[in-house]
Amino acid sequence: SLTYTIQENVEDIEELTIRIKLQDQYLLITNIYNPPNKKIDEDVYLALASRKNIILLGDLNAHLPIFGDSEANTAGKTMEKIIDATDLIVLNDKSGTHIKYNGGMSCIDITLASSNMALKMNWSVHYDSLGSDHLPIKISINSSAEKEPQNYSRYNLTRADWSSFKKESKARFQHSLYDENNSVYYKNITEAI
């Protein structure tokens, strides 16, 4: 399976970033949802876009002719400024990605990539909505992802003293480890183990 790590979230926007290792470099993939009529925070997006080897994609609710829409909205104009200020390349080929309530199409699902990565990518829309009002987007990368080695510890479970383990576990878990704060709860469990 593909090994990835989830990166720390950026505050004030709905996003998820993962990092995967390609043959010769790491790639950051940031998926963003920007609700309709929400102002795009230019500084936050510029910070995201300034990272190397990135794919920035998602439902940005940004309309712009270079994405395939006939007119630009405020979010689209902000995205245009961000694209102009960075080395991001628009991967969209002007195909519709969102089925509007009246049956028409719009291009609010945007895919941008660092210029060095864009040349290695192919972008396409899959025309089976799978029940959604958004069409799936396929991005192929002409570079293999590496599986990062996993360090698994091996234990000889046949030599374990299970009765001592059971007795020690009962002693350590006598009191409640639960805490409303997940970090404290996690710490209590790991310390008990």
Image (cartoon, rainbow, N blue to C red):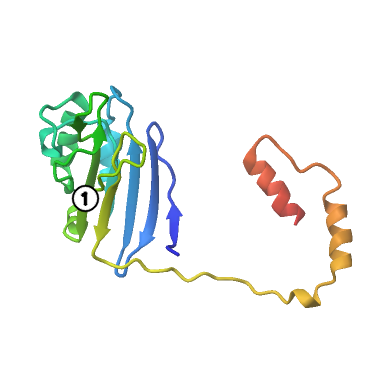
Residue 180 in view (yes/no): yes
**Residue reaching furthest top?**
37
Left or right position of 159 against 183: right
Q: Residue at x 37, y 33 (%)?
A: 13
- Count of picture labels: 1
Residue at 23 percent across and 24 percent down: it is 102
Residue 26 pos. (x, y %): 33, 61
Q: Is residue 51 visible?
A: no
Residue linked to disc 1: 124
Q: Amino acid at mark 1?
A: Ser
Q: Residue at x 59, y 71 (%)?
A: 152
Task: Give 89 or 43, whichever is nearer the viewer.
Answer: 89
User: To which quarter of the image does residue 66 belong?
Assistant: top left
Q: Quadrant of the N terminus?
A: bottom left
The residue at 17%/25% (across/down) is: 73
Camera-nearest residue between 95 and 75: 95
Mark 1 lies on a secondary structure that is: strand
Residue 29 position within the rendered picture, expressed as x and y whole percent measured from the top left: 33, 51
Which of 72 and 101 lies nearest the eye of the viewer?
Answer: 101
Image coordinates of residue 61 in percent, x first then y, are 26, 30
Side of 165 where 5 appears, left or right = left
Q: Position of residue 95 (x, y in %)?
A: 16, 41
